[in-house]
Image (cartoon, helix red, strand yellow):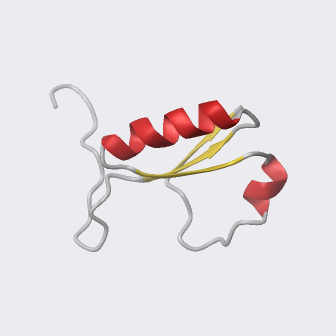
């Protein structure tokens, strides 16, 4: 990768990063989860901000995609 930031990788986490998707459209959640998973990310999705706040804090996501 030239001119950019190298993706984070650790020995105990084989995924590039943990991504939480928050969107009320199930098809958007599904599509983004699939695409990110294919690229090696650990992606999960919830349908609302309230649901995201109810998730356990550990391990926290590296990135949150919000609609």
Left-right relation of 41 to 5: right
Q: Position of residue 44 (x, y in %)?
A: 55, 53
Q: Position of residue 49 (x, y in %)?
A: 80, 48
Left or right of 34, for residue 11: left
Q: Position of residue 34 (x, y in %)?
A: 44, 40
Which quadrant does the N terminus fall into?
Answer: top left
- Residue drawn at (78%, 65%), measured in percent from left and top? 54
- Determine whether 39 is above or below 28 in the image: below
Q: Residue furthest top?
A: 3
Q: In which quarter of the view is residue 30 placed?
A: top right
Is 2 situated left or right of 41 in this image? left
Q: Tell which of 41 and 10 is nearer to you.
A: 41
Question: Furthest residue to the left?
Answer: 2
What is the tally of numbered marks visible in this picture? 0
The residue drawn where x is 61% and y is 31% is 28
Give the vertical position of 6 relative to 25 (above or below): below
Q: Which residue is rendered at x = 79% and y = 46% of the image? A: 48
Q: Is residue 44 left or right of residue 41?
A: right
User: Residue 5's spot in the image, x, y percent?
Assistant: 28, 37
Of 35 and 65, nearer the camera is: 35
Residue 42 lies in quadrant? bottom left
Can you say which quadrant of the picture contains the C terminus? top right
Residue toward you, 51 or 66: 51
The residue positioned 31% from the left and 41% from the top of the image is: 39
């Amino acid at each position: 990768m030239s001119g950019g930031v190298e993706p984070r990788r650790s020995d105990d986490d084989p995924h590039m990063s943990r991504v939480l998707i928050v969107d009320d459209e199930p098809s958007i959640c599904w599509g983004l989860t699939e695409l990110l998973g294919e690229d090696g990310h650990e992606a999960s999705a919830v349908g609302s901000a309230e649901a995201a706040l109810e998730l356990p804090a550990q391990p926290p996501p590296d990135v949150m995609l919000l609609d």
